[in-house]
Amino acid sequence: MSALGGLNKTPNGVVIGLVQLQLPLTKTPADLAAQTDKVVAMVAKARRNMPTMDLVVFPEYALHGLSMDINPDIMCSLDGPEVAAFKAACKENAIWGCFSIMELNPGGYPYNSGLVIDDQGELQLYYRKLHPWVPVEPWEPGDLGIPVIDGPKGCKLALIICHDGMFPEMARECAYKGAEIMLRTAGYTAPIRESWRFTNQANSFQNLMVTANVCMCGSDGTFDSMGEGMIVNFDGTVIAHGTTGRADEIITAEVRPDLVREARKHWSVENNIYQLGHRGYTAVKGGAQDCPYTFMQDMVAGRYRLPWEYEVVHTDGTACGYPAPTRRYGETLKEAAE
């Protein structure tokens, strides 16, 4: 159902391009500027590559690479030159774009943020990664929830980032808020390949939702990212998959949000996103609508504790060279020092 990668676009189709961007090595403001130019050039390439494309998606770490450098001199902001360049590129090429920045946070460590910009150059979605890949990543946990927007062709669109997709609750939240297409951008390296594949498919199937997922690609001399662009249909079927590991390749497919809506209305068996809140509706009218899940109840009450909670070895980033944090979530550096 990929419409030959989007070449044959149908009236209800949304054509997505996933950029398996070459993994950069960014150390200085000059490196950041050069990589911004590279991303802008790839937006133009995407438009030339596929005139039918509605949305081009860049991986996590597209500007900053995998160094985890928190140097404020190379951090970005929403009103900075990098985002301005992305907006101009989307408008000039009349295409929606999904981008990644490491965002300056004066109150603590930087945020790992994702942006979706429309074909008029306007910011439509702004998301901060909820689940940094601890203990490796130093990013501040996100505080904006998971926004769902009206995307290209009126589709309901959400964005999560990398490790977020390993938590089934993240994809479920996207779908619960109405997302028909969920983007997952990543910088994952080869050891994650298999779990990347099956979580992308599970996220789609469990929520009757299209997922479009892409990693950085190639080597920076230390790390090897895997590319692995995957567009997965709402039934869990992979309809496009970048398996060659070729850097800067754009993986494309047409997806059909109208068929997502149709399935969510008409599926009986395996309409799991509905049935979660209507357990056993064949036996009892409307199904059971309680919350039988202890972990949900405990999380809401602020008492989430695993049975093996106090046996967990890694509970901060010291194993990866970061100092043990003293600031609690919600506190600024200044407040924590007082």
Image (cartoon, helix red, strand yellow):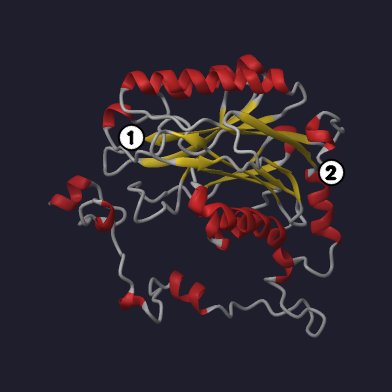
Q: Nearer the viewer, residue 74 or 263?
A: 74
Query: Which of the two marks, 2 or 1, is nearer to us in this view?
Result: 2
Give the residue type that dot 1 points to: Leu
Left or right: where 3 falls relative to 232: right
Element type at marker 2? loop
- In the rendering, at what x and y percent does residue 206 appear? 69, 62
Element type at marker 1? loop
Q: Quadrant of the N terminus?
A: top right
| N-terminal label among 2 and 1 | 2
- In the rendering, at what x and y percent does residue 69 appear? 31, 37
Q: Quadrant of residue 108?
A: top left
Residue corresponding to mark 2:
1
Left or right: where 71 falls relative to 239: left
Residue 104, numbered label: 1
- In the rendering, at what x and y percent does residue 53 appear? 73, 27
- In the rendering, at what x and y percent does residue 228 appear? 61, 43
Left or right: where 205 falls relative to 213: right
Separation of marks 2 and 1 at Cα, in angstroms: 41 Å
Residue reaching furthest top? 92
Q: Residue at x 26, y 42 (%)?
A: 107
Residue reaching furthest bottom? 283
